[in-house]
Amino acid sequence: MSTDWTAMKRALVRCPIIPVLTVKDVAQAAPLAQALVSAEMTVLEVTLRTDCAVDAIRIMAAAKPDAWVGGGTALAAADIERIIGAGGRFVVTPGAPARLLAAAVAAAVPVIPGIATVTEALTARDAGFRFMKFFPAGPAGGAAALKAFAGPLPDLVFCPTGGVSLDNLADYLSLPNVVAVGGSWMVPENLITQGRFDEIAVLARRAVDRARQLRP
Ligand code: 3PG
């Protein structure tokens, strides 16, 4: 597993929010990255849900070499390779089936496997992972579930994603086993498609300020 973890975790301490980005037009990639980095969000996840996602990773990674641009929605080993090939510095998966976990272990960059239950967390733990995406966080039990995970799984930390917002950010960031949260609330689809990147920067800044209040 990659040793870049330490540096990535340092970035997540500075800003414990990973914006989850769905880019439909490559022209959106650079201004979107600029808006988020201007608000001090430096770990950016581009989901592999659009035709141009890999190109978006390539453009963002080139435009913001000091940021951590990575890829999400990696469903298979080939997705991990596509993300790394585009310059992605980390990978997020929504789940953790055996073949994907094996590819994640072998990957040259940090991979954050997705889990929703204690059994899935134990499976990922057996493969060597200690930092996991808790997905879909809200439907899977929210902060209460993660708080309960801390008892039997004291050596694991999580990035809850799915249903996180400014309203429930405190619930998650108050938990010691939460390294960071992921979410798309600061990047609404209409603002991206309409090119309203200044407004995205304002939403991102509001989120970062709130996180810093919660974790000074
Ligand atoms: C996703 O996979 O889309 C992420 O979990 C983001 O979820 P959110 O849109 O609820 O923040």
Image (tube, grey):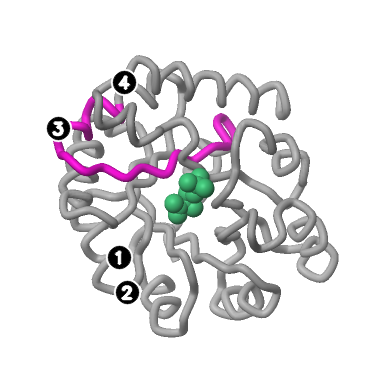
Residue at the location (31% across, 21% down)?
Answer: 197
**Which mark, residue 27?**
3
Q: Are marks 3 and 1 in contact (CB under 8 Å)?
A: no
**Which mark, residue 76?**
2
Mark before the other along the chain sequence, 2 or 3: 3
In the image, is residue 26 part of the stretch drawn in magenta? yes
Q: Between marks 4 and 3, how big is the CA–CA gap?
A: 12 Å
Mark before the other along the chain sequence, 4 or 2: 2
**Which mark, residue 80?**
1
What secondary structure is found at the residue carrying circle 2?
loop
Label 1 crowd (10 A; few <14 / some 14-19 / many >=20): many
**Mark 4 or 2, closer to the camera:** 4
In the image, is residue 50 part of the stretch drawn in magenta? no
Q: Between marks 3 and 1, how big is the CA–CA gap?
A: 23 Å
Q: Is residue 195 left or right of residue 75?
A: left
Q: Is residue 163 left or right of residue 5?
A: right
Residue at the location (64% across, 23% down)?
Answer: 210
**Which mark, residue 197?**
4
What secondary structure is found at the residue carrying circle 4?
helix
Residue 82's x, y, as percent?
21, 61
Residue 75's x, y, as percent?
35, 70
What secondary structure is found at the residue carrying circle 1?
helix
Quadrant into which the C terminus falls: top right
Whether residue 129 is visible to the viewer of this picture, yes or no, is: yes
